[in-house]
Image (cartoon, helix red, strand yellow):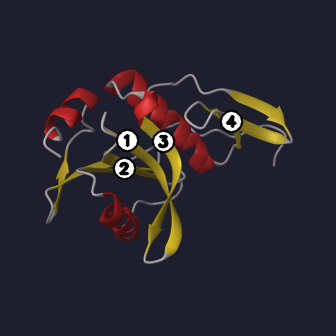
Amino acid sequence: MQDEPIFPMLNLPPQPVRVRREKGYELYDPLRQKWIVATPEEWVRQNFTSWLISAKGYVPSLMANEVGIRLNGMLRRCDTIIYNRRLKPVAIVEYKAPEVEITQQVFDQIARYNMVLGAKVLIVSNGIRHFCCRFNGVSYSFIKEVPEYPALICENQNS
């Protein structure tokens, strides 16, 4: 790594992400309760999850980062899963580094994860561009904004 970290500006309000320098730069992940190597994707993850909590009312104890799931017999990692109080996944988030373009492949990836999880809302972000869509059990439709947690839970009460 370089001597000075390069944390790109994101299209999010500034967040209180903790950074330290040990064997390179690390970011503290409060959801995993440990220090993580500071990669561009991890920078996006920490800022985005902090924003979900501070601006959208998401509950940290009902969120998990880097969750292992089985897909077609293979272990995959879902970037962030948001749960309801019954611990049913209601939203999943896929992150990319800011320089990575959000393409159809990224949406295909998160849709495959959702075949296992069955969440109603999918979110994709590279920190610059954020996309959100609803799943009605058959198809996906884009929505303008990431829903606030209380609205997300109301939508999923019967799930």
Q: Say whether residue 28 is visible.
A: yes
Q: Is residue 79 above or below residue 110?
A: above
Can residue 51 be seen here? The reply is no
- For the residues labelled 1 and 2, say whether their Cβ atoms are less than 8 Å apart: yes
Residue at position x 54%, y 52% in the image: 97
* Residue at x 85%, y 40% (from the top left corner): 3
Task: For label 2, count other residues whose C-alpha is less than 10 Å away and answer few (under 14), some (14-19) or many (20+).
Answer: many
Q: Residues within 10 Å of mark 4 (few under 14, many from 20)?
A: few
Give the residue type that dot 3 points to: Ala
Q: Which residue is mark 4?
A: 34
Gap in Å between the C-alphas at discs 1 and 3? 7 Å
State the residue at coordinates (51%, 34%).
Answer: 47
Residue 65 numbered tag: none
Q: Position of residue 81 (x, y in %)?
A: 41, 46
Within 10 angstroms of label 1, few (less than 14), some, or many (20 or more) residues? many
Q: Amino acid at mark 1?
A: Ile
On the rendered structure, is 127 left or right of 153?
Answer: right
Circle 2 residue: 92
Residue 154 on image: x %, y %: 16, 33
- The alpha-carbon separation of the residues under discs 3 and 2 comes to 10 Å
The residue lying at 61 percent from left, 48 percent from top is 40
Q: How far apart are the alpha carbons under marks 1 and 4?
A: 19 Å
Left or right, 3 with respect to 110, comes to: right
Q: Residue furthest front?
A: 86
Provide the residue designation for mark 1.
82
Foreground residue among 150 and 95: 150
| Label 3 close to label 2 by CB (< 8 Å) | no
Determine the secondary structure under disc 1: strand
User: Where residue 131 sits in the image (x, y, percent)?
Assistant: 31, 50
